[in-house]
Image: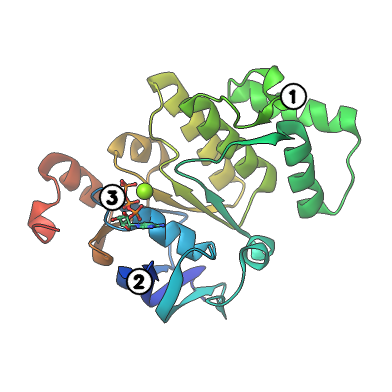
Amino acid sequence: MKPLLEIKDLHAQVEGQEILKGINLAMDDGQVHAVMGRNGSGKSTLANVLMGSPFYEVTQGQVLFKGRDITNEDTTTRARMGMFLGFQYPVELAGVRVYEFLKTLHRNKTGEDIKPAEFRAYLSDIMSTLDMEPDVLGRGLNEGFSGGEKKKLEVLQLLLLQPELAILDETDSGLDVDALRTVSWGIRKAVERGSKVLIITHYTRILDYLSPDRVHVLLNGRIVASDGPDLAQKIDDQGYEWLGGAQ
Ligand SMILES: Nc1ncnc2c1ncn2[C@@H]1O[C@H](COP(=O)(O)OP(=O)(O)OP(=O)(O)O)[C@@H](O)[C@H]1O
Ligand SMILES: [Mg+2]
């Protein structure tokens, strides 16, 4: 069977500086893969490049999704093919109401114009399990949201879109213990419904909830180790030094 995602010798740069220096990674088994690595090692760059961000230039290598070379495809095409990115720092768009934004996502995904009452009921169910305030729907997108509220809105989008591949960039960062449990529940739900997840994280806590099949370590623009879940625990105990020293 073809791997869902295959990254081959991927090099990418921003403003003339090479950040990704030959990434090799395959999601060929299991449903949850984790990427860990020091601050500044290139994790968010990888997530953005995978989603086709125009701010990064791929200079070498390939990304294959479901066996198709998507290296030169734009973000919209990748999203239509079933990819989703949960941002480390979700953007604030004051002029866009959350409700309208979610409705557009739903319409793009299903091709249906769902009745407002039906859509509100559907959202209200997910939002109550994510412990989100209903008035969020009437606010500007992420406008004035707390860090935790932003991350929950990312998970709401994940559950709404139910993508084949969700790349989640530190969806667990900055959450209190209850919010972490709630967000983990949401991600787990998406996995149970068939989404595969590539989660970038600094902490083993979320991995206790999600039990990853593989853990990859990204250091200084390269994957330096890929192994089972014990690797995350080892990093938690010993840090990154043993994997390749200084950046
Ligand atoms: N748009 C950009 N302009 C300039 N430098 C950038 C840009 N994007 C990323 N970089 C640089 O690339 C390097 C990797 O950044 P990246 O955000 O990918 O790291 P990260 O592994 O996600 O770190 P963290 O764990 O802190 O989120 C950093 O040195 C960063 O300053
Ligand atoms: Mg990052």
Disc 3 under 8 Å from ligand 1? The reply is no
Residue farthest front in this picture: 15
Measured as percent of width and height from the top left, residue 189 is found at 57, 39
Q: Residue at x 14, y 51 (%)?
A: 240
Question: In the picture shown, does residue 104 fall above or below 126?
Answer: below
| Label 3 secondary element | loop
Residue 125 figure quarter: top right
Q: Residue at x 64, y 18 (%)?
A: 133
Q: Earlier in the sequence, mark 2 or mark 3?
A: 2
Measured as percent of width and height from the top left, residue 192 is found at 57, 45
Q: Residue at x 51, y 39 (%)?
A: 188
Distance from disc 2 to disc 3, alpha carbons, whole Å, reads 35 Å
Q: Earlier in the sequence, mark 1 or mark 2?
A: 2
Residue ID for mark 1 = 138
Quadrant including the C terminus? bottom left
Residue situated in front as seen by the camera: 216 or 135 = 135
Residue 171 figure quarter: top left
Distance from disc 1 to disc 2, alpha carbons, whole Å, reads 41 Å
Residue ID for mark 3 = 229
Q: Residue at x 53, y 62 (%)?
A: 53
Q: Earlier in the sequence, mark 1 or mark 3?
A: 1
Three-letter code, disc 1: Gly
Distance from disc 1 to disc 3, alpha carbons, whole Å, reads 41 Å
Three-letter code, disc 3: Pro
